[in-house]
Image: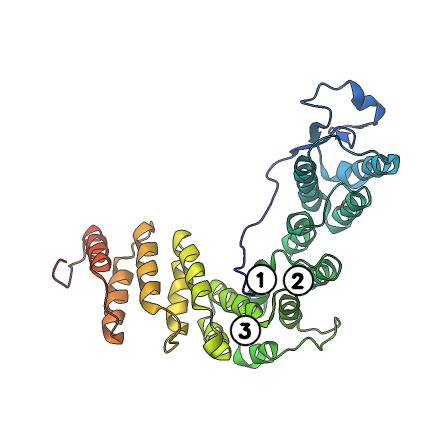
Amino acid sequence: MIVTPDHETDRCSDGVVLLPRSLLVCSTTHLSSLQDTQHLQVQDDFFTQLHVNGQEMEGKAAQTLREFVETGKRPEVPPKSTAESCKVLLSKAAEVGGYEIAKEMFDLLLLGRLVDPGPQIVAPLLQCKLDRNDLPGSIEVAEYIYKNFNTLPKRMEILIRLMQHNPPTEENLLPVLKRDGSQTQQDSDLLGRMFELVQACYGPAQAQHDLLFASLESGYPDAAWLVLQTLGGDVDGRQVLRMCKIYAKNQREVALEHLLVASKGITNIDRLKICELLLDAYTISNEAVGEKALSLWTSMQEEGLTPSPTFLSNLATLLEKCEIKVPFQGQ
């Protein structure tokens, strides 16, 4: 099954989060005991606010959470609310305390049956490694997560970071594409290990598509071409098109430009549609992209791609806006 990679991340943006009242109440000076929380004025019987800093999170919050879990109590709120609070707790723990405290919190939440270890819950364990640029540690955590919970969050972010750290070449990328899962966890090829994880979780075809998109997003069209050649007739044109729409919407025109370079001669990729999406990205860009748009049209003529009337109309509007002469008759 081909699964479109997600690019979303779940991060906590401030130091105030909602948590179970029975779990912990921290301030910048002290951590209230469980008994002391009973008189607090809160929105309901389960939530209150938590103000944390790194030192308190590392010590007192984990201790209080452990004490709560040991009581065997269960929250009296919908599971979705509990999961959301715990997700934010783990994100904050990863941000201010690092992997060890986040892992301790995670283990306690599992022990107390407060969360299910889905992608959003386990993602902070990876995020704290990525935030500290610990790529070997990121792979180790990803291997732990997949082995124990059969999920693989942030896989695209990890692949992109690995390529940025060690630029892909034909020499080091071909062995990755040929990997079959027989290597060991002690393997020093981090990209290869991550590729095998994606293979195991989503299948070989999705793993190769992930490498394709990571190559485009990290700025390596030659690597993307190599992946496309390896995929051959197994290229999923629909998935490629879905990603192109995401790139256009998010003004990732460079990734689209790289795909046009890499996909020349690939018959099951709709290059005309990619050109249209690239023009859309140029149109909503705040940059001066008139010359790029004109160059795109020229390349289409050379390749024999026939632009639609809508494409030509949009191109003419963009060129006029950039004060560039329109080289064709109005449609």
Q: Position of residue 153 (x, y in %)?
A: 63, 56
Amino acid type at mark 3:
Pro
* Helix, strand or loop status at disc 3: loop
Q: Position of residue 309 (x, y in %)?
A: 20, 59
Location of mark 1 (residue): 161
Residue at the spot x=76%, y=40% of the render?
Answer: 114
Circles 2 and 1, Cβ within 8 Å, touching? The answer is yes
Q: Position of residue 28 (x, y in %)?
A: 73, 29
Location of mark 3 (residue): 168
Q: Earlier in the sequence, mark 2 or mark 3?
A: 2
* Helix, strand or loop status at disc 1: helix
Measured along the vertical axis of the image, is residue 122 above or below residue 267?
above
Q: Quadrant of residue 6?
A: bottom right
Answer few, some or many: residues within 10 Å of disc 1's Cα (few below 14, many 20 plus, some between 14 and 19): some
Most foreground residue, 221 or 132: 221
Location of mark 2 (residue): 135
Circles 2 and 3, Cβ within 8 Å, touching? The answer is no
Amino acid type at mark 2:
Leu
Residue lying farthest to the front in this orientation: 1
Amino acid type at mark 1:
Arg
Residue lying farthest to the right in this orientation: 70
Which quarter of the image is occupied by the C terminus? bottom left
Q: Quadrant of residue 191?
A: bottom right
Answer few, some or many: residues within 10 Å of disc 3's Cα (few below 14, many 20 plus, some between 14 and 19): some
How far is the residue under mark 2 from the one under mark 1? 8 Å
216 lies left or right of 200: left
Answer few, some or many: residues within 10 Å of disc 2's Cα (few below 14, many 20 plus, some between 14 and 19): many
Q: Earlier in the sequence, mark 3 or mark 1?
A: 1
How far is the residue under mark 2 from the one under mark 3? 16 Å
* Helix, strand or loop status at disc 2: helix
